[in-house]
Image (tube, helix red, strand yellow):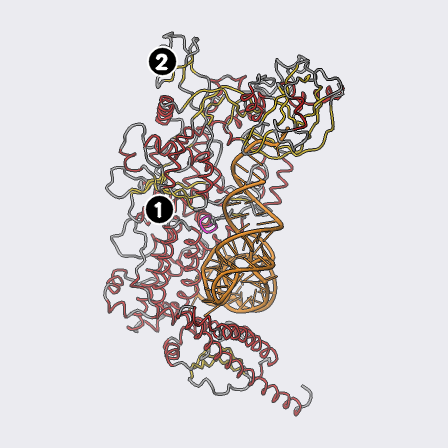
Amino acid sequence: MTTTSALPKQYDPSEVEPRWRRFWLENGFFHADEASPTVPYSITLPPPNVTGSLHIGHALGFTLQDILIRWKRMQGFNAMWMPGIDHASIAVHVLLEKDLQRREKKTRFDLGRDEFLRQAWAWKERSGVRISEQEKLMGYSLDWPRERFTMDERANRAVIEAFVRLHEEGLIFRAKRMINWDPVSETVVSDLEVDIAEENGSLWDIRYPIVGAPGEAITVATTRPETMLGDTAVAVHAGDERYKHLHGKQVELPLTGRQIPIVAVDLMIDGKPWPDPSFGSGAVKVTPAHDPSDYEVALQAGLPVLQVIDAKGRICDPAPAKYVGMAVADARKAVVADLEAAGVLGTVKDYRVPRGRSQRSGAVIEPMLMEQWWVKAAPLAEKAIAAVEQGKTRFVPEHETKTFMHWMTHIKDWCISRQLWWGHRIPAWHCPCGGITVAREPPAACSHCGRTELRQDEDILDTWFSSGLWPFSTLGWPDKTRELATFYPNNVLVTGPDILFFWVARMMMMGLHFLGKVPFRTVYLTSIITDENGAKMSKTKGNGIDPLDVVFGATLEQLVERVDIEKPPVDLDQLKRAVRKNFPKGIPAMGADALRFAMAALNTTLRIRLSVDRVEKYRNFINKLWNASRFALMNLDGYDPERFEAQLSTAAGRAALGMPERWILSRLQAVVGEVDAALESFRFNDAAGAIFHFVWDELCDWYIEVAKPHLYTGPEFEQDAARNARRHVVQGVLATALETTMRLMHPFSPFVTEEIWQKLPKPPQLPGSLMITVFPRSDPSWTDSEAEREMQLLQEVAVGCRMLKQTYGVSPAQSTDVELRVGNPEQRAVIERQLGIIERTAKVAARVSADIAAPAPAGSAKEVVGGELEIVMPLGGLIDIAAEKTRIARDIAKADKEITGLDKKLGNADFLARAPEDVVAEQRARLAEEQARRRRLADALATLSSEATEAAKDGAKGGAA
RNA sequence: AGGCACGUAGCUCAGUGGGAGAGCACUACCUUGACACGGUAGGGGUCCGCGGUUCAAUCCCGCGCGUGCCUACCA
């Protein structure tokens, strides 16, 4: 008769999720009002790059943020979660240029700046929409009307303001320094954007002949022979006796006809002597234009700087004409061949060479000397260091503080100009007079000479420059807005440790500099997700898990087809094989709730090795929750929430609750406390684990089972007033426990909890959506340690009964007689009172007796639950005496081990004297309990032995068995 | 090379100065009126090694071995 009985047996997220998503958005529940008088709680979403779609790492970080935001919103905070998207300058460049190369065999220079930017904007529109759609599908409660883009008008204004102010303050300047050049993207990149790894290479020895000393030469070693074309000196350590006689002499630089000096140097670079006399020959070639160390030497020794590699990574002019125009790799071969021909090449050996590559383009980085724009980092870092030292911002996990501080205290100036197009163009204008005018608006005239023929700097800013302003540029800075006053600083930043320096450090520096306040109180750093083998997930490896595939499911064919569509820059067939191997069965649809719950539950301080079946566990959990609710809804007819609420509001009404009811409500309030405390300290996995355990192991496995007989209806019960009253109480407790669980779990899995909550009967005057109800509060008045003790006893007895039944092959469906011998009168009273629970959950017909010492009937199995409690199951002749003896003997052995340990401890005078009293008492109690249990076991074994003897006699009497 | 983590059941990982835990996997049984995306029971661990502190160490400290991450301009 009830419509609820039509609930499907399996939870179907595809039917449920869209309804609530629409409902929440249409009602504007995600929006926070900056003028609200309630206490603000704010988080800024780390804006995803417009390079494509969200990956599983986003799903992790964003889910944790949504859990915090939904939790705080339900606690009554004015919770604001700022959405946005990042223009990701160089990442978009690499992407678009690869595409351009593949489709039209063109570079961005063939297209020109305007057309390239037009395409970039078109890309941004497509990708941006896709990203926000994905965020909505995951149920993230972002404050959508506030959504921002790092290159929208207001962000642009903030960027220009910040640049101009820092320039005015002397914290942004232009200087010619050694930089990292990416010859593929043709731009400078910052130190952080270079990945250094050891690659296979060679170490070449070259002999440079000494001028005026025929036959004499000095040997230098190098991993980059082609740079010798730009050498301007050979350096030896000043204290190196071997070369003292050569100080100030000249060598003839092979292949070039140039003469360069041998200079004595006594330098410390990074705390190490340079050159190191113990390495190789102790002499080094000096190429100031293309090596950072060499440049430092040149500065000190006043050596000339000769640039022989150009922006495209080709040998250029001052080098001999023969090599000009050659790519570095080709030049290397030519130079080596020529050196060999000239007879100056020494030994060549295989060598592991540390090689820097551009993180984005993969190009081998060329160190070069170039004029760029820089941010003076040290003064900014000082403030950030002080703020962290003063605890204004703290890191979770705490150990990340050290990483942050180490980098901050060793910080180097930040190169912020890029020779790219997609980004914020630097607000600086060059005049033919050589002067540079930095201004908020295009200036009419040069600030130095007054001339009007100015041209704007071609360079754009590092993408992280605008990101660094994000926590306040999104709130209206540089204007003094209400939003800024309300939501800055943010309460928390949640992001991955991989962008601690790129982003977190920059936001700290910028926020403190421009607003005088830290941008966030807490930085929570998430795990890193890898595949199940610990390898980073990546499209080019075919091991990546797309969060939406987990939500909606994908067949293997779909996964493989996608390889063709996305065309990553690798062997497609090989990639398809990898996909087939990694996802042989495709990915089943799990729904957003399951993925979200999994993210919270799996997040630990270590990396997460994610696999599809690890998420499946939580899909099953969501289904379990669904079915528990389904059961409740099928049995809640006639339930009156108001009447039940009235009953709970009186002491007498509460006292009338049955023990299992008091137990589950006690457990419920405990788990509420656990979840709240765990979230308070960002232990998402503990919070999720507590909910999981409560729902599955307590609510489903015990309470619902115990409740069943009280809920079932039948004509025979209609006139039974006491039973009907009891039924109503059980309905009320079940409904209440579920309703509270939905509120508790809502931040983790919003869709299924909203769906169930909406269906549950509950008192009127509640809000129209679960997401704006009140988060449960732990209420210690519901703690009932007596009920918890009693329930635990019943569980132990029931488990013991089940064990005996299973051991002796009694069908679970078949009820069996058992005798519960309980020596302890209190325990006996509990068991007698609640016998029905044992009988129902273990499917036994139980009789309780006090006489624990009486011999058990022959042929019965026995389980000793404690020193004063045993379960006797008569089995007639069915008992396998030998097996039973083995089982009991093993229990005795365990008890003996335990007793020996405790005896030893309690016999130790130092322990008795020094250990706290309660510990000593506890150990004594354990010993007594264990000894009593051992006696029971020994008795049982003795009985079995005599039975065995009897049986043997019987067998002998009756002839062959 | 330095810094920081981590080493617990076959696998992935929780955990605590005083009785070793979960999920998956494994074994056996069960279509019991919420759920087979389920239920019940079971097997399985010198808590990496060696020292130290302590009445007591899987937990705290030191050393060693192994793994991972980050930082780093050794030709």
| Mark carried by residue A35 | none
Tell me the quarter of the image containing the C terminus of chain A. bottom right
Q: Is residue A655 visible?
A: yes
Magenta-span inclusion, residue A312: no
Give the residue number, with chain letter if any, for mark 1.
A70
Q: Is residue A921 left or right of residue A349?
A: left
Tell me the quarter of the image containing the N terminus of chain A. bottom left
Identify residue type, mark 2.
Pro
Q: Position of residue A567 (x, y in %)?
A: 58, 32
- Residue A353: quarter of image: top right
Q: Position of residue A861 (x, y in %)?
A: 53, 80
Question: Mark 2 or mark 1, which has the lower sequence index?
Answer: 1
Above or below, comparing residue A778 to residue A245 in the picture: below
Magenta-span inclusion, residue A601: yes
Q: CA distance from mark 2 to mark 1?
A: 48 Å
- Residue stretch in magenta: A598-602
**Which residue lies at the image location 35% right of the left edge and 46% below the top edge?**
A70
**Which residue lies at the image location 66% right of the left edge and 18% below the top edge?**
A249
Q: Is residue A565 visible?
A: no
**Which residue lies at the image location 59% right of the left edge and 39% below the top edge?**
A541
Which numbered disc, 2 or 1, marks the residue closer to the eye?
A: 2
Q: Is residue A168 left or right of residue A532?
A: left
Magenta span: chief secondary structure: helix
Identify residue type, mark 1.
Arg
Above or below, comparing residue A443 to residue A493 in the picture: above
Q: Secondary structure at mark 2?
A: loop
Q: Chain of mark 1?
A: A
Q: Secondary structure at mark 1?
A: helix
Question: B72 and A944: which one is in front?
Answer: B72
Are discs 2 and 1 less than 8 Å apart at CB? no
Q: Chain of mark 2?
A: A
| Mark carried by residue A443 | 2
